[in-house]
Image (cartoon, rainbow, N blue to C red):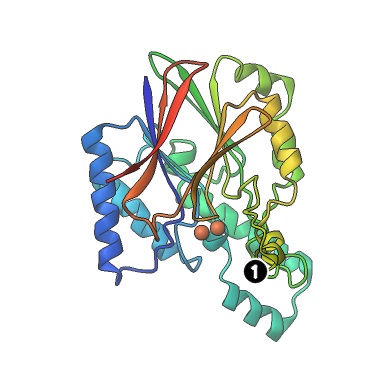
């Protein structure tokens, strides 16, 4: 039996918010008390794309002995990549070419990955980035975490809030060669990205008008890759809601938001290659 804890959307905003940092300490201490094999944090560590917030996460994980490749996996969310105000100011002042902005965005993704490299490759230095696959051999089952970046750069018309997601074709292509697919055959495969497959829909027209600004644009392509890899689960965040849903036999788990519900997390118990249990736990 393998136990995985999943939290998301911390939206840290510096060291001033003592209460939130204490709550984070309390949660990490709880994970150690209960005894989890692995922790997944599915993006939006920072609220304003500030690496100082990533540093807080790194320090806290270190102080709870969780800053290790086999213990924790983190990915970036849109709030780790894009500070909307800064982005708009930069755009309005300089009107930079799309290529320049694309490069700046790619640099930030690489920055995130090299910052957390020990949790990606297990090495202290390096710049390996998305997608990455982490295979951990537990006595009872082999777990593969397949992590993709779904954050898409801010564009005035296509991504006005910076919250829309895309998984670029290069990442999807990197995961589907026959040797990758066959190396995952023996594993319990868990997909991981920040954005949701299911757009949060209500009947309200106002909600519907906003849905597209939050959606994962190429979710069907992403789903097809998850099916090819025979993923059992996909973990994500972004919508700040604790929810589960099934699409084409794959179970999606939204890890909610630690920022807004700091006493709640998702617990996964994997009992073997074919079976798992999931529940949302409240401290
Ligand atoms: Fe978020
Ligand atoms: Fe987000």
Badge 1 marks a residue whose secondary structure is loop
The residue shown at (77%, 70%) is 157
Image coordinates of residue 93 in percent, x first then y, are: 69, 86
The reply, left or right, for residue 170 in relation to residue 20 is right
Question: Label 1 CB, ligand 2: below 8 Å?
Answer: no
Q: Nearer the viewer, residue 232 or 156?
A: 232
Crowding at mark 1 (Cα within 10 Å: few <14, some 14-19, many 20+): some
Indicate whether 217 appears above or below 91: above
The reply, left or right, for residue 169 in relation to residue 202 is right
Q: Which residue is mark 1?
A: 161
Q: Is residue 129 visible?
A: yes
Q: Nearer the viewer, residue 33 or 135?
A: 33
Give the quarter the ligand 2 occupies. bottom right
In terms of image quadrants, where is residue 266? top left
The residue shown at (74%, 32%) is 224
Image coordinates of residue 233 in percent, x first then y, are: 56, 31
In terms of image quadrants, where is residue 107? bottom right
Q: Nearer the viewer, residue 107 or 142?
A: 142
The reply, left or right, for residue 14 in relation to residue 127 is left
The residue shown at (31%, 47%) is 61
Indicate whether 108 appears above or below 71: below
Image coordinates of residue 106 in percent, x first then y, are: 65, 57
Indicate whether 269 appears above or below 28: above
Image coordinates of residue 140 in percent, x first then y, are: 40, 13
The residue shown at (37%, 56%) is 261
In terms of image quadrants, where is residue 187? top right
Q: Which quarter of the figure is the N terminus placed in? A: top left
Q: Is residue 64 visible?
A: no
């Amino acid at each position: 039996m393998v136990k995985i804890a999943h939290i998301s959307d911390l939206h840290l905003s510096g060291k001033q918010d003592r209460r939130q940092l204490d709550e984070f300490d309390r949660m990490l201490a709880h994970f150690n008390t209960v005894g989890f094999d692995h922790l997944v944090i599915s993006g939006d560590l920072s609220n304003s794309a500030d690496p100082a917030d990533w540093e807080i996460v790194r320090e806290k994980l270190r102080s709870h002995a969780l800053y290790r490749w086999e213990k924790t996996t983190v990915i970036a969310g849109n709030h780790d990549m894009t500070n909307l105000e800064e982005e708009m100011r930069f755009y309005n002042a300089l009107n930079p070419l799309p290529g320049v902005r694309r490069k700046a965005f790619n640099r930030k993704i690489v920055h995130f990955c090299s910052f957390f490299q020990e949790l990606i490759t297990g090495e202290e230095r390096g710049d390996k980035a998305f997608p990455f696959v982490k295979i951990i051999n537990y006595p009872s089952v082999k777990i593969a975490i397949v992590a993709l970046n779904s954050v898409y750069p801010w564009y005035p018309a296509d991504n006005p809030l910076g919250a829309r997601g895309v998984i670029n074709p290069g990442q999807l292509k990197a995961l589907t060669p026959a040797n990758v697919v066959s190396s995952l055959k023996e594993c319990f495969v868990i997909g991981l990205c920040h954005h949701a497959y299911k757009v949060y829909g209500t009947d309200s027209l106002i909600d519907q008008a906003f849905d597209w600004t939050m959606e994962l644009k190429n979710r069907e392509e992403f789903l097809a890759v998850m099916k090819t890899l025979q993923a059992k689960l996909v973990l994500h965040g972004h919508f700040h809601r604790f929810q589960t849903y099934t699409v084409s036999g794959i179970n999606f788990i939204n890890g909610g938001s630690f920022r807004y519900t700091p006493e709640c997390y998702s617990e996964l118990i994997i009992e073997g290659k074919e079976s798992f249990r999931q529940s949302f736990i409240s401290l």
